[in-house]
Amino acid sequence: MGLRENLQTEPVSELPLRPVVTIAADRTVRQAVESMQAEHIGCAVIVDDQQKPIGTFTENELVLLLDDCGTGVLNEPVGNHVSPAWAHVTETEPIARLLDEMQTRNVRFVVVCDEQGRARALSGQKGLMEYISEHFSRVVAVQRVDTPEYPESREGA
Amino acid sequence: MSDFTPQQPTADEFKDPLANYEPFVYEDPLERAIGEEPVGTIRHEPFTTIMPSTPIRVAVDLLAGLEIACLMVTDEDNHLLGVFTHRDVLDKVALNFDNLQESPLSDVMTTEAISVHESDSVAAALCVMAVGGYRHVPVLDENEQVVGIVGPQRLTEFLQEKFQQLA
Protein backbone atom coordinates (compact mmCIF):
# COMPACT_ATOMS: atom_id res chain seq x y z
CA MET A 1 0.00 0.00 0.00
CA GLY A 2 1.10 3.56 -0.58
CA LEU A 3 1.80 6.22 1.99
CA ARG A 4 -1.68 7.72 1.78
CA GLU A 5 -3.38 4.39 2.46
CA ASN A 6 -0.97 3.54 5.27
CA LEU A 7 -1.64 6.84 7.00
CA GLN A 8 -5.33 5.93 7.05
CA THR A 9 -4.91 2.35 8.23
CA GLU A 10 -1.74 1.95 10.27
CA PRO A 11 -2.00 2.71 14.00
CA VAL A 12 -0.04 5.37 15.86
CA SER A 13 1.92 2.56 17.52
CA GLU A 14 3.68 2.07 14.14
CA LEU A 15 5.28 5.50 14.42
CA PRO A 16 8.69 5.97 16.04
CA LEU A 17 7.59 6.88 19.57
CA ARG A 18 9.66 8.81 22.11
CA PRO A 19 9.68 8.10 25.85
CA VAL A 20 7.33 10.56 27.52
CA VAL A 21 8.56 13.04 30.12
CA THR A 22 5.77 13.48 32.65
CA ILE A 23 5.52 15.99 35.46
CA ALA A 24 2.93 16.90 38.07
CA ALA A 25 1.28 20.30 37.79
CA ASP A 26 2.65 21.50 41.11
CA ARG A 27 6.27 20.96 40.07
CA THR A 28 8.17 24.04 38.97
CA VAL A 29 8.94 25.23 35.47
CA ARG A 30 12.62 24.77 36.34
CA GLN A 31 12.02 21.09 37.13
CA ALA A 32 10.17 20.66 33.86
CA VAL A 33 13.05 22.29 31.95
CA GLU A 34 15.61 20.09 33.70
CA SER A 35 13.65 16.95 32.84
CA MET A 36 13.30 18.03 29.21
CA GLN A 37 17.03 18.78 29.02
CA ALA A 38 17.92 15.40 30.51
CA GLU A 39 15.76 13.52 28.00
CA HIS A 40 16.66 15.78 25.02
CA ILE A 41 13.02 16.41 24.27
CA GLY A 42 11.08 19.59 23.75
CA CYS A 43 7.91 18.66 25.60
CA ALA A 44 6.89 17.67 29.12
CA VAL A 45 3.45 16.18 29.65
CA ILE A 46 1.63 17.41 32.74
CA VAL A 47 -0.24 14.51 34.31
CA ASP A 48 -2.63 13.93 37.18
CA ASP A 49 -2.08 11.34 39.90
CA GLN A 50 -3.32 8.61 37.57
CA GLN A 51 -0.77 9.51 34.90
CA LYS A 52 -3.49 10.90 32.67
CA PRO A 53 -2.41 13.94 30.67
CA ILE A 54 -3.97 17.29 31.52
CA GLY A 55 -1.73 19.41 29.31
CA THR A 56 1.76 19.96 27.96
CA PHE A 57 4.65 22.34 28.55
CA THR A 58 6.85 22.80 25.53
CA GLU A 59 9.86 24.78 24.33
CA ASN A 60 7.38 27.22 22.80
CA GLU A 61 5.88 28.07 26.20
CA LEU A 62 9.40 28.38 27.60
CA VAL A 63 10.42 30.95 24.97
CA LEU A 64 7.25 32.98 25.53
CA LEU A 65 7.73 32.94 29.31
CA LEU A 66 11.38 34.00 29.15
CA ASP A 67 10.48 36.79 26.76
CA ASP A 68 7.65 38.04 28.97
CA CYS A 69 8.99 37.43 32.46
CA GLY A 70 12.65 36.41 32.45
CA THR A 71 13.93 33.71 34.76
CA GLY A 72 11.62 34.70 37.61
CA VAL A 73 9.01 32.39 36.13
CA LEU A 74 11.23 29.31 36.57
CA ASN A 75 10.10 28.84 40.16
CA GLU A 76 6.40 28.98 39.39
CA PRO A 77 4.25 25.83 39.13
CA VAL A 78 4.37 24.43 35.62
CA GLY A 79 0.61 23.86 35.87
CA ASN A 80 0.20 27.64 35.59
CA HIS A 81 1.82 27.58 32.14
CA VAL A 82 0.15 24.80 30.22
CA SER A 83 0.20 25.00 26.42
CA PRO A 84 -2.99 26.74 25.20
CA ALA A 85 -3.44 23.93 22.67
CA TRP A 86 -2.28 20.37 23.03
CA ALA A 87 -3.21 17.07 21.44
CA HIS A 88 -3.49 13.45 22.43
CA VAL A 89 -4.37 10.25 20.60
CA THR A 90 -4.50 6.60 21.57
CA GLU A 91 -1.89 4.21 20.22
CA THR A 92 -4.54 2.27 18.30
CA GLU A 93 -5.93 5.20 16.36
CA PRO A 94 -4.75 5.68 12.75
CA ILE A 95 -1.74 7.86 12.04
CA ALA A 96 -3.97 10.14 9.93
CA ARG A 97 -5.74 11.12 13.15
CA LEU A 98 -2.42 12.19 14.72
CA LEU A 99 -1.62 14.22 11.61
CA ASP A 100 -5.04 15.81 11.72
CA GLU A 101 -4.64 16.72 15.40
CA MET A 102 -1.23 18.28 14.74
CA GLN A 103 -2.57 20.41 11.92
CA THR A 104 -5.89 21.36 13.50
CA ARG A 105 -4.34 22.39 16.80
CA ASN A 106 -1.09 23.63 15.22
CA VAL A 107 1.05 21.66 17.64
CA ARG A 108 4.40 19.97 17.22
CA PHE A 109 3.98 17.20 19.81
CA VAL A 110 1.16 14.72 20.35
CA VAL A 111 0.74 12.71 23.53
CA VAL A 112 0.13 9.03 22.85
CA CYS A 113 -2.09 7.35 25.42
CA ASP A 114 -3.00 3.76 26.18
CA GLU A 115 -6.58 2.55 26.22
CA GLN A 116 -6.94 3.67 29.83
CA GLY A 117 -6.00 7.22 28.85
CA ARG A 118 -2.59 7.18 30.53
CA ALA A 119 0.32 8.94 28.83
CA ARG A 120 2.47 6.24 27.29
CA ALA A 121 4.69 7.96 24.71
CA LEU A 122 5.26 11.08 22.69
CA SER A 123 5.11 11.56 18.95
CA GLY A 124 4.80 14.42 16.52
CA GLN A 125 6.58 16.06 13.63
CA LYS A 126 9.88 14.26 13.91
CA GLY A 127 8.29 10.82 14.21
CA LEU A 128 6.06 11.60 11.24
CA MET A 129 9.05 12.59 9.10
CA GLU A 130 10.84 9.36 10.01
CA TYR A 131 7.73 7.34 9.14
CA ILE A 132 7.38 9.08 5.78
CA SER A 133 11.06 8.67 4.94
CA GLU A 134 10.82 4.92 5.61
CA HIS A 135 8.24 4.73 2.81
CA PHE A 136 10.71 6.34 0.43
CA SER A 137 13.97 4.91 1.74
CA ARG A 138 15.12 4.15 -1.81
CA VAL A 139 15.35 7.85 -2.58
CA VAL A 140 15.84 9.34 0.89
CA ALA A 141 18.48 7.13 2.49
CA VAL A 142 20.87 7.59 -0.45
CA GLN A 143 21.01 11.38 -0.24
CA ARG A 144 24.30 13.15 0.41
CA VAL A 145 23.49 16.38 2.15
CA ASP A 146 25.45 19.43 3.20
CA THR A 147 27.76 19.29 0.19
CA PRO A 148 28.71 22.41 -1.76
CA GLU A 149 26.69 23.12 -4.88
CA TYR A 150 29.84 22.95 -6.99
CA PRO A 151 33.08 21.08 -6.18
CA GLU A 152 35.81 23.30 -4.81
CA SER A 153 38.46 21.68 -6.98
CA ARG A 154 38.47 19.63 -10.12
CA GLU A 155 38.63 15.89 -9.90
CA GLY A 156 41.18 13.89 -11.79
CA ALA A 157 44.23 15.10 -13.65
CA MET B 1 57.00 9.26 -31.34
CA SER B 2 54.62 6.36 -30.90
CA ASP B 3 53.32 4.55 -33.91
CA PHE B 4 49.95 3.96 -32.22
CA THR B 5 46.94 4.32 -34.48
CA PRO B 6 43.59 3.91 -32.72
CA GLN B 7 41.43 1.29 -34.29
CA GLN B 8 37.81 2.21 -34.79
CA PRO B 9 35.40 -0.63 -34.04
CA THR B 10 33.25 -1.86 -36.84
CA ALA B 11 29.52 -1.69 -36.55
CA ASP B 12 29.48 -5.35 -35.55
CA GLU B 13 32.19 -4.84 -32.90
CA PHE B 14 30.69 -1.74 -31.26
CA LYS B 15 29.35 -2.36 -27.78
CA ASP B 16 26.97 0.25 -26.40
CA PRO B 17 28.39 1.29 -22.98
CA LEU B 18 24.83 1.95 -21.81
CA ALA B 19 23.58 -1.48 -22.84
CA ASN B 20 23.36 -2.59 -19.18
CA TYR B 21 21.95 0.69 -17.89
CA GLU B 22 18.78 0.18 -15.89
CA PRO B 23 17.06 3.47 -15.09
CA PHE B 24 15.68 3.84 -11.60
CA VAL B 25 12.04 2.77 -11.60
CA TYR B 26 9.83 4.65 -9.20
CA GLU B 27 7.18 2.62 -7.43
CA ASP B 28 4.60 5.38 -7.51
CA PRO B 29 4.19 9.01 -8.61
CA LEU B 30 4.70 10.27 -5.06
CA GLU B 31 8.10 8.60 -4.81
CA ARG B 32 9.00 10.20 -8.15
CA ALA B 33 7.92 13.62 -6.87
CA ILE B 34 10.04 13.24 -3.74
CA GLY B 35 13.00 11.91 -5.70
CA GLU B 36 12.93 14.43 -8.54
CA GLU B 37 11.15 17.63 -7.59
CA PRO B 38 13.48 20.31 -6.20
CA VAL B 39 13.32 21.65 -2.66
CA GLY B 40 12.47 24.99 -4.23
CA THR B 41 8.94 23.69 -4.92
CA ILE B 42 8.29 23.34 -1.19
CA ARG B 43 7.08 26.57 0.41
CA HIS B 44 10.27 27.91 1.96
CA GLU B 45 9.25 31.45 2.84
CA PRO B 46 8.82 33.38 5.01
CA PHE B 47 12.08 33.03 6.92
CA THR B 48 13.97 35.20 9.35
CA THR B 49 17.69 35.86 9.53
CA ILE B 50 19.71 37.49 12.27
CA MET B 51 23.30 38.59 12.80
CA PRO B 52 25.57 36.67 15.22
CA SER B 53 26.33 39.81 17.22
CA THR B 54 22.66 40.28 18.16
CA PRO B 55 21.99 40.06 21.91
CA ILE B 56 20.35 36.82 22.97
CA ARG B 57 17.36 38.62 24.51
CA VAL B 58 16.60 40.18 21.10
CA ALA B 59 16.73 36.77 19.47
CA VAL B 60 14.39 35.28 22.10
CA ASP B 61 12.05 38.24 21.63
CA LEU B 62 12.03 37.61 17.87
CA LEU B 63 11.22 33.93 18.30
CA ALA B 64 8.38 34.81 20.67
CA GLY B 65 7.03 37.77 18.69
CA LEU B 66 7.09 36.08 15.30
CA GLU B 67 5.87 32.75 16.76
CA ILE B 68 8.62 30.82 15.00
CA ALA B 69 10.97 28.14 16.21
CA CYS B 70 14.12 28.93 14.24
CA LEU B 71 16.22 31.94 13.32
CA MET B 72 18.96 31.58 10.70
CA VAL B 73 22.16 33.34 11.67
CA THR B 74 23.91 34.90 8.69
CA ASP B 75 26.82 37.20 7.89
CA GLU B 76 26.54 40.50 6.01
CA ASP B 77 26.47 38.63 2.71
CA ASN B 78 23.57 36.40 3.75
CA HIS B 79 25.76 33.31 4.09
CA LEU B 80 24.62 30.83 6.71
CA LEU B 81 26.64 30.75 9.91
CA GLY B 82 24.24 28.73 12.05
CA VAL B 83 20.77 28.59 13.53
CA PHE B 84 19.18 29.56 16.84
CA THR B 85 16.17 27.47 17.73
CA HIS B 86 13.78 26.65 20.51
CA ARG B 87 16.09 23.76 21.39
CA ASP B 88 19.01 26.14 21.90
CA VAL B 89 16.83 28.16 24.26
CA LEU B 90 15.95 25.03 26.22
CA ASP B 91 19.47 23.59 26.38
CA LYS B 92 21.70 26.64 26.60
CA VAL B 93 19.76 29.72 27.64
CA ALA B 94 16.71 29.05 29.78
CA LEU B 95 18.23 28.35 33.17
CA ASN B 96 20.81 31.15 32.84
CA PHE B 97 18.83 33.69 30.85
CA ASP B 98 19.38 36.62 33.17
CA ASN B 99 23.18 36.31 32.83
CA LEU B 100 23.16 35.57 29.12
CA GLN B 101 20.59 37.93 27.68
CA GLU B 102 23.06 40.65 26.65
CA SER B 103 25.63 38.17 25.32
CA PRO B 104 25.93 37.80 21.55
CA LEU B 105 23.95 35.10 19.82
CA SER B 106 27.19 33.59 18.55
CA ASP B 107 27.82 32.29 22.08
CA VAL B 108 24.82 29.96 22.01
CA MET B 109 23.76 29.39 18.41
CA THR B 110 24.08 26.00 16.75
CA THR B 111 26.92 26.31 14.25
CA GLU B 112 26.74 22.90 12.60
CA ALA B 113 23.44 23.46 10.80
CA ILE B 114 22.80 21.11 7.88
CA SER B 115 21.37 22.87 4.84
CA VAL B 116 20.17 21.95 1.37
CA HIS B 117 20.23 23.81 -1.92
CA GLU B 118 17.00 24.82 -3.62
CA SER B 119 17.99 22.62 -6.55
CA ASP B 120 18.39 19.52 -4.34
CA SER B 121 15.51 17.07 -4.37
CA VAL B 122 12.74 17.03 -1.78
CA ALA B 123 14.25 13.72 -0.68
CA ALA B 124 17.35 15.60 0.49
CA ALA B 125 15.30 17.81 2.79
CA LEU B 126 13.44 14.77 4.10
CA CYS B 127 16.76 13.03 4.68
CA VAL B 128 18.08 15.91 6.79
CA MET B 129 14.93 15.87 8.90
CA ALA B 130 14.34 12.16 9.26
CA VAL B 131 17.84 10.70 9.12
CA GLY B 132 19.82 13.68 10.36
CA GLY B 133 17.27 14.52 13.04
CA TYR B 134 17.13 18.24 12.25
CA ARG B 135 13.72 19.86 12.34
CA HIS B 136 14.64 23.04 10.48
CA VAL B 137 16.52 22.88 7.20
CA PRO B 138 17.93 26.10 5.75
CA VAL B 139 17.69 26.39 1.95
CA LEU B 140 20.53 27.98 0.00
CA ASP B 141 20.88 29.14 -3.59
CA GLU B 142 23.82 28.38 -5.89
CA ASN B 143 25.75 31.26 -4.33
CA GLU B 144 25.41 29.66 -0.89
CA GLN B 145 23.09 32.44 0.23
CA VAL B 146 20.04 31.80 2.37
CA VAL B 147 16.79 31.84 0.40
CA GLY B 148 14.45 30.02 2.77
CA ILE B 149 13.79 27.34 5.34
CA VAL B 150 11.75 24.14 5.29
CA GLY B 151 10.46 22.01 8.11
CA PRO B 152 7.96 19.22 8.78
CA GLN B 153 4.94 21.49 8.48
CA ARG B 154 5.86 22.79 5.02
CA LEU B 155 6.93 19.36 3.86
CA THR B 156 3.59 17.93 5.00
CA GLU B 157 1.82 20.67 3.00
CA PHE B 158 3.84 19.63 -0.06
CA LEU B 159 2.82 15.97 0.42
CA GLN B 160 -0.84 16.85 0.84
CA GLU B 161 -0.77 18.91 -2.37
CA LYS B 162 0.70 15.88 -4.12
CA PHE B 163 -2.01 13.62 -2.66
CA GLN B 164 -4.61 15.92 -4.19
CA GLN B 165 -2.83 16.23 -7.55
CA LEU B 166 -2.28 12.52 -7.83
CA ALA B 167 -5.72 11.44 -6.63
Image: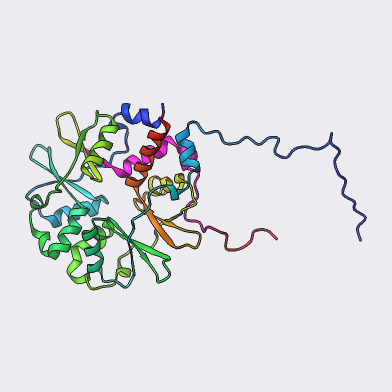
**Residue furthest front as drawn:** B165
Query: Which residue occupies 34% across, 50% down?
Result: B135
Residue A122, percent across and down? 24, 41
Residue A55, percent across and down? 13, 44
Residue A155 vs residue A85: left or right? right
Residue B78 vs residue B89: left or right? right
The picture quadrant where one finds residue B46 is: bottom left
Q: Is residue B59 above or below residue A144?
A: below
The image's colouring method is rainbow
Residue A140 part of the magenta segment = yes
A54 or B158: which is nearer to us? B158
Residue B139 part of the magenta segment = no
Residue A145 vs residue A81: left or right? right
State how many labels appear: 0
Q: Is residue A122 visible?
A: no
Residue A137, percent across and down? 46, 38
Name the image quarter holding the C terminus of chain B.
Answer: top left
The picture quadrant where one finds residue B18 is: top right
Residue A139 vs residue A155: left or right? left
Name the image quarter holding the N terminus of chain B.
Answer: bottom right
A66 or B58: which is nearer to us? B58
B65 or A57: which is nearer to us? B65
Q: Is residue B108 visible?
A: yes
Q: Which residues are magenta?
A: A121-149
Residue A99, percent across and down? 28, 37
